[in-house]
Amino acid sequence: MLSPLPSASRAPPRAPYSYRDEVCRARPLLGTVVEIRAASSNAQPSLHAVVDAAFAAIERVQRLMSYHVPDSDLSVINRTAAGTEQRVDAATYAVIESALRIAALSEGAFDPCVGERLERWGYLPASAATADARREFAGRWQDVELLGQCRVRFSRPLLLDLGGIAKGYAVDRAVQTLQAAGVEEICVNAGGDLRVAGARARTIRLRHPLAPDLSAATLTLQDSALATSAAYYSRRRLPFGEVSALLDPRSSRPYVDGGCVSVRAADCMSADALTKVVLFAAPQLAERTLAACGAQAFVQSPAVDPARPEAAGVTAGASPRSGTQNARQIIANSARGNAAPGILNR
Amino acid sequence: MIPGSRIVVLPLAAITLCQPAQAMSYLSVEQAQQLMFGSRPLTPLPLALNATEIGAIERDSGVKVYAGSLRAWKADDGYFFTDAVIGKHDLINYAVALSADGKVRQVEILEYREAYGGEVRNAGWRAQFVGRHHGDPLQIGQDIQNISGATLSCQHVTDGIRRLLSTYAIAIAKR
């Protein structure tokens, strides 16, 4: 039986929050629209200036870790770190370190070494390196060596893509920038990967996986982060089949089904990476990884009655009987009984 | 569900309780001008593009030009623009500040409206969800401002800014 959601069961009380300044602004960054809401009575020199600094922190992460920027740290090591150690910015090093930790915990269900495959599907720009057809980039997360003092080396050629984790990190840096300036109430939302800080509990709507312009469930967040992964915006058809920006790093299969996974964690970087773990790892492994990160996952799946998940072929995540079934299969099984097949698998 | 499980299957809430497309107003044109240029005076800059210029802008940027979407102002140390782009899922109005030598200094979204067409608007399709309830009622009008979901691309804003820079180079810097 499904227990009530730990913190989503009650709408937050309306409190007479009052601050001298409130700012809500948005910029096109990280390939999406990034929105910053901030409220404060003592931001110096002004709340707008602090929000500018928070956007600048996000821009810095983009400059360092974007696959699309040819001279980013990431692009440089993708070209040069195979067999040769390279120094990167401390921020880049920290994100690679976190990516590898979650890759190890999830036994590769999350793996940042998916650049070449996402290039081939058209989700990343073709890098100069892959233009040379003789080169292969078969390296995986185990081939990324962290040598301390911000030095990185690849033991095999590989193309690192931090797209599944750096957006969350950028959100975290923006939140930290605002907190350091004394801003009391904060919400940074990078196109769906978001983090809130402050005394106010915020209700977050999750997009309906079959009708993403509508919201389905709501969750309440306070001083925590939420990230969501789903294929509804990125699915497209290629001559050899359907793909999405979500790729199972071990099988190289795309996630193209109609469900979606949200993860709540203390920080947005972990939440961002963990959505992929829940999509692609077997439930017990996903449970362990979530536990190690202090996180919780919420699966929205068409036509699953949460009171009787087994009716749709879903056994709750931790059930021993479902040891080999991952969220992808849970969602796929449940979709078969859906009343609106035309919307699915498109 | 086994106690302690960290993976929760959520029901799909009744679509009747769902809020449709979101619209956000971040800044007015005046607020964006104030943010980007402070109290320095801005003079409207008429942009009557002729067919030759439109053709050149479209070739240079690879983006179609729509008459009247772009508005420009001149300051003593730069330019202020407002423009709009329509994507597959959304309509975005934005403001751009250029320095006097035509480099992007700041971009701010003014308004963001989501739209989604087709089958999801179909009443019959929606009706199947009527009556399904979730124990966490959505109270419209309460402090619900944020949405989590798969990331929406802002590629068309990037395209729009490229078109704006082409317009600056072809129709403003040369004049």
Image: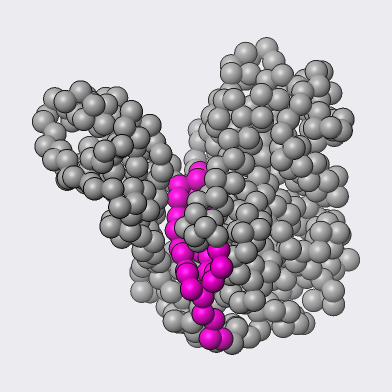
From this view, report whether residue A244 is shown above or below residue A79: below
Q: Position of residue A309 (x, y in %)?
A: 71, 74
Q: Position of residue A238 (x, y in %)?
A: 51, 36
Quadrant housing residue A79: top right
Horizontal side of residue B50 vs A217, given as left or right: left
From this view, report whether residue A70 is shown above or below residue B7: above
The structure's colour scheme is: one colour
Rendered residue at 61%/59% (across/down): A181
Rendered residue at 81%/28% (across/down): A151
Horizontal side of residue A105 vs A246, given as left or right: right
Horizontal side of residue A245 vs A109, given as left or right: left
From this view, report whether residue A211 is shown above or below residue A26: below
Quadrant housing residue B140: bottom left
Q: Position of residue A51 (x, y in %)?
A: 52, 56
Rendered residue at 58%/74% (across/down): A202
Closer-to-camera residue (A217/A292): A292
From this view, report whether residue B12 is shown above or below residue A251: below
**Residue A260 seen in the current view:** no
Q: Which residues are magenta?
A: A15-43
Query: Does residue A31 belong to the magenta stretch?
Result: yes
- Point out the image quarter for the N terminus of chain A: bottom right
**Residue A266 seen in the current view:** yes
Q: Position of residue B93 (x, y in %)?
A: 32, 52
Rendered residue at 86%/59% (across/down): A292
Query: Does residue A221 belong to the magenta stretch?
Result: no
**What main secondary structure does the magenta stretch of the protein show?**
strand
Horizontal side of residue A274 vs B126, given as left or right: right
